[in-house]
Amino acid sequence: MKVVAVVPTYNERDNIGNLVGQVFATVPAIEILVVDDMSPDGTADAVRALQPRFPRLGLLYRKEDRGFGPAYLAGFREVMRNPEIEAILMMDADLSHNPAHIPAMLERIVTCDAVIGSRYTANGGVSGWELWRRILSRAGNRYVRAVTGMPFRDCTSGFNLIRTDLLRRLDLTGIGSSGYAFLMELKHLMWRSGANIQEVPIIFLNRAGGESKLSGHIVTEGIRSPWRVRFGNKR
């Protein structure tokens, strides 16, 4: 299966080299597309420096419509220009998503349309988080499930593997979230389409370096978006 990992970045210069090396060491045949939003720390330059060593590493440098959700959508569009790509892997650049879980996700995608790398299914979990963050994440997932009706244990996971034929069937232009709520909204759109979505356990790690992107806007959007998709994304 031909797979491209789409990795959005903003100020991840200190992490991107380790991530790229680990992903290619784990799955040599994969391709990686880094989608950088003009990171002032020079993340894009770090990627360019890696490209001679890793010919399957691509860079999409964006100067407009910045944000987490728009970065992913731009990456999806870029990847799907190639009809030979069969699946897109979504993952963070900060090493919180362990590349060691990718083989299990690739194995599962053979029997379904999309795979969620789940912290909250059996044998999943998190490592290195403070108690308040564990409580916030679990409460947030329960909130999303209650409002949207989605059956997944981890509605907000950012570690996902999705078949491109499924993405092509969806109206991605209707997604309105720019922050991490994009992850929930995309899952809701897939679920409402009738896609076969399965979860595999992962251990989510605390970011290796740099600063968290969590902000007041992201939290507010996370509270409002489940209600919007519940009553707006009827498919």
Image: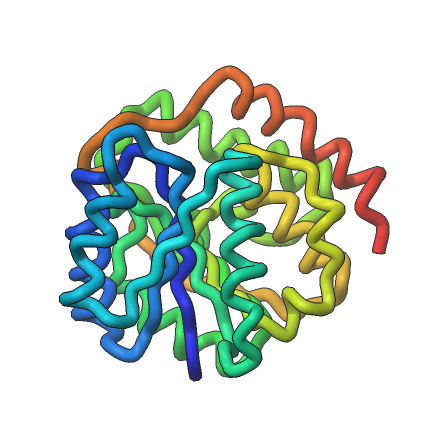
In the image, 140 versus 177, the foreground residue is 177
* Residue 71 visible from this viewpoint: yes
In the picture provided, is 176 more to the left or to the right than 68?
right
Q: Is residue 159 above or below residue 4?
A: above
Identity of the residue drawn at 36% across and 21% down: 132
Q: Which residue: 50% across, 45% down?
A: 71
Question: Which residue is found at the position 17% from the left and 70% from the top?
Answer: 25
Q: Residue at the location (30% across, 29% down)?
A: 40
51 above or below 92? below
Nearest the eye: 128 or 14: 14
Seen in the picture, residue 61 relative to 100 is either above or below; the reply is above
Task: Where is residue 140? Give x, y as percent.
Answer: 54, 31
Quarter location, residue 223: top right
Q: Colour scheme of this structure image?
A: rainbow
Outermost top residue: 216
Count of numbered marks: 0
Against 159, is 63 above or below? above
Image quadrant where one finds the C terminus = bottom right
As drawn, is 31 to the left or to the right of 52?
right
> 94 or 138: which is nearer to us?
94
Residue nearest the viewer, comparing 108 with 69: 69
Describe residue 107's horizontal placement relative to residue 13 as left or right: right
In-image side of 186 versus 28 (left or right)? right
Is residue 117 something that shows in the picture? no
Q: Could you say where residue 68 lies in the image, as x and y percent from the top left?
A: 49, 38
x and y percentages locating residue 161 in the rendered image: 47, 64
Q: Quadrant of the N terminus?
A: bottom left
Q: Where is residue 167 shown, x and y percent of the image? A: 64, 65
